[in-house]
């Protein structure tokens, strides 16, 4: 289960960034134009979307692929 | 040396739209932008709201953490810069300033935080902070000089314009983007204002005419939202670049009542009016129009009339007066700016917006009110805009024909 597709859809819906315009392995800050404030808001939206709580210590994630891995991990650990 | 301060650009995002000329025409025709809002509140509420398309100014990504109050400010300031024919590269960024008024800050962000059932956006604080509008204007326009916010309730943006004028007059900045924004038409704020007992009461279907400044049957104001900015630069600079000058900001007066937190005070208001006249080197009879604070409260309108009577004396009848709040509502932190803009346009066109909804003038408010059929003033040379705040701060701006 990878959350990447859903994250791409979410980032498109929320910020109008097409999946093809943001390489999952590129920096969301530098390539995607998401500054620290937008990223904080995006993490909040991810929590709402998946019904999860993101751990604070991983806030320095830089790429969508890294973010998808973390979301996968949190979702997998979530009690059913 | 002291520079003469020219108004070279006007930008507005108001309940009557985002074109200054159309706004002025609507006011000349006494078209009210006030409508009922929030039908589910216990007490009927009305407001003048802005039909705003934020996608004209922001991408979805740029909107992250940007409250409506800042969105309106960015749009109005950008329109003002365009109207002045200025782009960021036309001035040394360190010699451009933003002087912005805001009474409350991002009300929608706070309301959403409260109503989120514990889910609070991490950007609530940067969205809410009252200096966010000025900061967003600065980022959009690349302004690196003084970027300041004035929060003086209903006098916020009038005081901001006065402070901007000082900076231009003293040569501290070459260009000042001066005005203000307010956007607090959310249920939590509207019920708070209702509790303050200063809002107009109205019958169903009669919200548009609810605000009746200086009339016997007045009962208070209606909240409005919006933003307005003026571009101020020295008259020499404006001439040198061939810019159109709408008017000169010739005087400003700031005073404090120092008597009561919310009750207005005629002597305090008169001090601000006299200070503006003194600075402009004008006598009361030289000023042909006053865009009144005119909130249509029982006490406020009488006190303002008394302040004008005290300063104008035997010349009071030569002063034409109107309060345009009857039509665009009370925009609080943006009120001084939109009313300054209207005053500048009145001077520029030598035409006065009528004092709407006054069928019978209160004898205690006896003033020469502008009427619908008598708006042309071919000899108009100077005009004042009054802004009197909760907290007792009074701000008067005096404009002359350019």
Image: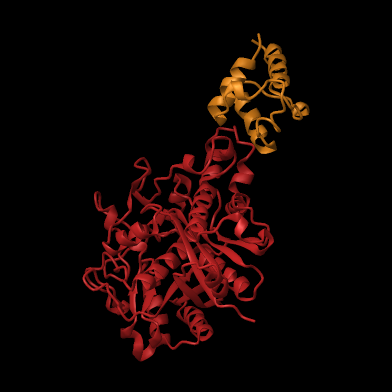
Chain colours: A orange, B red
Q: Position of residue B98 (x, y in %)?
A: 60, 60
Q: Position of residue A24 (x, y in %)?
A: 68, 20
Q: On the rendered structure, is B243 left or right of B297? A: right
Q: Position of residue B243 (x, y in %)?
A: 50, 67
Residue B235: x and y in percent read 54, 74
Q: Residue at x 37, y 60 (%)?
A: B221
Q: Is residue A19 left or right of residue A60?
A: left
| Residue sitting at the far bottom | B314
In the picture, measured across the screen, residue A2 lies left or right of residue B269, that is: right
- Quadrant that contains the N terminus of chain B: bottom right
Q: In front: B186, or B383?
A: B383
Q: Residue at x 40, y 86 (%)?
A: B286
- Decide which of B164, B273 is in the foreground and name it: B164
Residue lying furthest right: A57
Q: Is residue B389 visible?
A: no
Above or below residue B137? Residue A67 is above
Regarding residue B54, the answer to whether it shows in the image is: yes
Tell me the residue at 31%/71% (across/down). Answer: B351
Tell me if B283 is positioned left or right of A65 in this view.
Answer: left
Q: From what the image shows, is residue B168 above or below residue A76?
A: below
Report the label total: 0
| Foreground pick, B144 / B38 | B144
């Amino acid at each position: 289960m990878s959350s990447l597709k859903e994250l791409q859809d979410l980032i498109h819906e929320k910020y109008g960034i097409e999946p093809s315009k943001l390489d999952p392995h590129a920096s969301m800050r530098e390539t995607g134009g998401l500054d620290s404030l937008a990223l904080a808001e995006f993490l909040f939206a991810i929590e709402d979307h998946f019904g999860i709580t993101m751990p604070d210590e991983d806030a320095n994630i830089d790429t969508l692929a890294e973010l998808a891995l973390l979301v996968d991990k949190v979702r997998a650990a979530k009690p059913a | 040396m002291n520079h003469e301060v020219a108004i070279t650009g006007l930008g507005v995002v108001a309940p009557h739209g985002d074109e200054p000329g159309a706004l002025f025409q609507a006011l000349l025709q006494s078209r009210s932008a006030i409508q009922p809002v929030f039908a589910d509140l216990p007490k009927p509420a009305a407001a003048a709201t802005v039909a705003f398309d934020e996608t004209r100014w922001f991408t979805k990504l740029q909107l992250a953490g940007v409250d409506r109050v800042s969105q309106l400010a960015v749009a109005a300031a950008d329109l003002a810069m365009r109207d002045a024919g200025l782009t960021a590269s036309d001035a040394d960024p360190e010699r451009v300033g933003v002087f912005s008024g805001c009474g409350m800050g991002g009300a929608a962000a706070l309301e959403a935080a409260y109503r989120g059932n514990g889910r609070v956006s991490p950007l609530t604080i940067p969205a809410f902070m009252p200096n966010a509008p000025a900061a967003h204007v600065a980022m959009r326009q690349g302004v690196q000089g003084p970027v300041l916010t004035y929060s003086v309730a209903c006098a916020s943006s009038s005081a901001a314009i006065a402070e901007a004028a000082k900076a231009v007059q003293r040569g501290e900045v070459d260009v000042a983007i001066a005005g203000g924004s307010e956007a607090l038409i959310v249920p939590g704020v509207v019920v708070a204002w209702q509790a303050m007992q200063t809002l107009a009461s109205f019958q169903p279907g009669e919200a548009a005419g609810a605000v009746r400044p200086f009339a016997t049957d007045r009962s208070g104001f209606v909240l409005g939202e919006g933003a307005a900015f003026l571009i101020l630069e020295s008259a020499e600079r404006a001439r040198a670049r061939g810019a159109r000058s709408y008017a000169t900001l010739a005087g400003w007066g700031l005073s404090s009542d120092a008597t009561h937190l919310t009750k207005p005070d005629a002597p305090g208001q008169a001090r601000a009016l006299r200070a503006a006249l003194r600075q402009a080197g004008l006598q009361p009879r030289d000023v042909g129009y006053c865009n009144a604070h005119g909130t249509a409260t029982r006490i406020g309108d009488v006190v303002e009339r008394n302040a004008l009577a005290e300063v104008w004396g035997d010349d009071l009848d030569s002063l034409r007066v109107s309060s345009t709040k009857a039509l665009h509502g009370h925009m609080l932190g943006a009120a001084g700016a939109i009313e300054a803009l209207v005053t500048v346009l009145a001077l520029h066109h030598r035409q006065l917006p009528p004092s709407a909804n006054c069928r019978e003038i209160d004898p205690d408010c006896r003033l020469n009110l502008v009427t619908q059929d008598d708006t042309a003033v071919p000899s108009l040379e100077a005009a004042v805009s009054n802004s009197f705040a909760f907290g007792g701060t009074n701000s008067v701006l005096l404009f002359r024909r350019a």
